[in-house]
Amino acid sequence: MSKAVIDALVERFPEAVYDPYEGVGGDDCAFVKKERIAEVCGWLKTDPRMQFNYAPYITAVDYLGQTPRFEVVYNLLSTKTNARIRLRVKVPEDDCVLESVTAVWRGADWFERYCFDMYGIRFTNHPDLRRLFMYDEFVGHPLRKDYPLRGRQPLVVEREVHDIYRGPGPATRD
Amino acid sequence: MASELDTLPVITTRRDEAQGFLEGLVSKGLGWARKYSLFTYPFVTACCGMEYMTLASARYDSDRFGAAMPRFSPRQADLLMVVGTVNCKQAPILRRIYEQIADPKWVMAFGVCASSGGFYDNYATVQGIDRIIPVDIYVPGCPPRPEQVLDGIMLLQKKIQDQAHKLVDRKQLPVVGREPAAG
């Protein structure tokens, strides 16, 4: 749909944007180099032809076993031109640091906190990078593929239960 | 050779008998009064709350069983209804709510998530609130139909009637879930 958008983006940042393709549903997708993401996002928001003034969803993906391991996905929407674009940023495991885009979209604040909470990806220049869902005592990042599925970290000492299905013992057992 | 004392029944004085009889009467009366005036504290955390609303409103009307007065202060409640999923972050809150309710108090686990964690067998969810606080009655279902909850309330009323009630109870209250101090 917005082929003009992706073409203009590749033309503007030929060394930062690579491998553009049309994703599921016709959204334009492209990979962006990690160091340039804030710059690319700032241009997409402020350029009068683009005007991507809304970031509906920013999330992360853990491709365990691949290098680079993580990927941060920026879904952008322009309410002026009704165009959508998806930017994917590869993030290696040993350098999980990105530049924050909260200066571009204020609403990216909680999405980046979510990515930090669930995947451990840190964002520089973020105003308040705390956990979003889990409690501060929680160790690790639960949506990483190598986090144990039942890795519960109870905050209170749990009572002993005697149960046929769950078996005896507190929840730290299972 | 067994002494003939072994076969004798336990000797109770008339005073003991009379006291036990009176205590039984008082217990029955208090149980009858308490089972029909369950003030509930709805600890509603998830989608079972919709079913709780159905239960409390006109069609199913848990007020018929005397259990429809939601008190939004735990200090005025008798029955803690834990309606919905409780996750690890909420567990200290739930325990505090339970400790704030004055005795006598009862707890109902409403729905599978409160009873056993349900299908949320993951990093965040407490596998049943009985890991946090003692539970008197479990109502399974995802969510349970209001009839099931009414059945649970009736079973709880039967349980309350059969419990021993006292006018003045000076027993040492158990502290829930805390590990005894080491040594």
Image (cartoon, grey):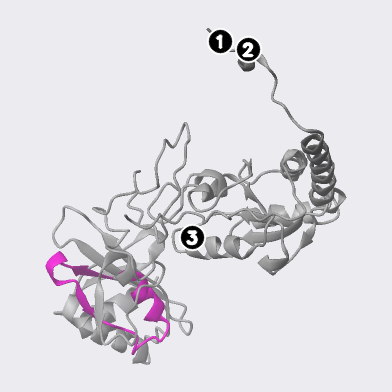
Numbered label attached to residue B2:
1
Q: Position of residue A152 (x, y in %)?
A: 36, 54
In what quadrant of the picture does the C terminus of chain A appear? top left
A24, B50: nearer the viewer: B50
In the image, is B62 to the left or to the right of B170?
A: right
Residue A160 belongs to the span the image colors magenta: no
* Horizontal relation, residue A13 to residue A100: left or right: left
N-term mark: 1 or 3: 1
Image coordinates of residue A116 in percent, x first then y, are 30, 71
Q: Earlier in the sequence, mark 2 or mark 3?
A: 2
Query: Is there one chain holding both mark 2 and mark 1?
Result: yes
State the separation of the CA atoms marked 2 and 1.
6 Å
Q: Say which of B118 and B17 sits in front.
A: B17
Please report contact status of discs 1 and 3: CB closer than 8 Å, yes or no. Answer: no
**Residue A28 found in image quarter:** bottom left
Which contiguous range is marked in magenta? A88-115
The reply to whether the C-beta atoms of the residues labelled 2 and 1 are less than 8 Å apart is yes
Q: Is residue A110 magenta?
A: yes
Residue A75 screen position, x and y as percent: 37, 72
Q: Tell me the element at label 3.
A: helix
Mark 1 crowd level (few <14, some 14–19, many ≥20, 10 Å Cα): few
Dot 2 alpha-carbon crowd within 10 angstroms: few under 14, some 14 to 19, many 20 or more: few
Q: Identify whether B48 is placed above or below A23.
A: above
- To which quarter of the image does residue B88 belong? bottom left
Give the labeled residue for mark 3: B91
- Chain bearing tag 3 is B
